[in-house]
Image (tube, rainbow, N blue to C red):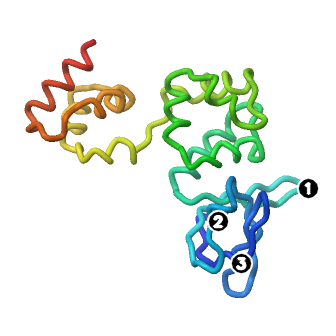
Amino acid sequence: MYSYIIGVVTEYDKNCIILENNNIGYLINVANPYSFKQKEEIKVYLYNHIKEDENSLYGFKTKEEKDLFLKLINVKGIGPKMALPLFAGDNIRGIYDAINSDNVTYLTRFPKIGDKVAKQIILDLKGKLTSQVDLFQYDSSELIEVLESLGYKTNDIKKVITKIDNNLNLESQIKEALKLLGK
């Protein structure tokens, strides 16, 4: 299994890019090939999908995107070709939020995702997804550690952390978080 590949994008089409590494061109299915720049060296995180009649590579710009993709393809009724378009908008946080807030409408705006499939995604993944990038982008790691040590779940912390003023001292941030978590 491949984890990632570093190479130069030599071509792209509507569904894929050709990434050259050591004079070998790898055809990699991606959600938005035009977001990659030609003749630029990049790192692409890979998923190798193997079936009896298929051996395909799927590529992602970040490890977090790949991890979410792997969780999505484990949902009943979703394969790689159905899950890949969810990443076309480069808004992975929107996918996390839609799943955790039961937003079927957001998920059904993607191709091939109907009402039934969106509900299945939410049923299988709600409460199981946390975006570590989202949690730590606010530079509140101490606050998160304190709240976790008090027994609060990561999903609950994620919901309130964005509402807390980072300019407050740690003690005030904890008090504010506890008020919000108590509601």
Q: Which residue is mark 2?
A: 2
Q: Residues within 10 Å of mark 1 (few under 14, many from 20)?
A: few
Q: How many marks?
A: 3
Q: Which residue is mark 1?
A: 53
Does residue 117 sit above or below 64 in this rendering? above
Element class at badge 3: strand
Residue 46, x across and y down, in percent: 64, 61
Specify the quadrant of the image occupied by residue 10.
Answer: bottom right
The dot on residue 8 is none
Q: Residues within 10 Å of mark 2 (few under 14, many from 20)?
A: few
The dot on residue 10 is 3
Residue 5, x across and y down, in percent: 61, 72
| Three-letter code, disc 3 | Thr
Could you tell me if the residues under marks 3 and 1 are in contact, i.e. CB atoms within 8 Å?
no
Element class at badge 1: loop
User: Alpha-carbon distance for marks 3 and 1?
Assistant: 27 Å
Residue 15, x across and y down, in percent: 77, 57
| Three-letter code, disc 2 | Tyr
Q: Residue at x 74, y 36 (%)?
A: 78
Could you tell me if the residues under marks 3 and 2 are in contact, i.e. CB atoms within 8 Å?
no
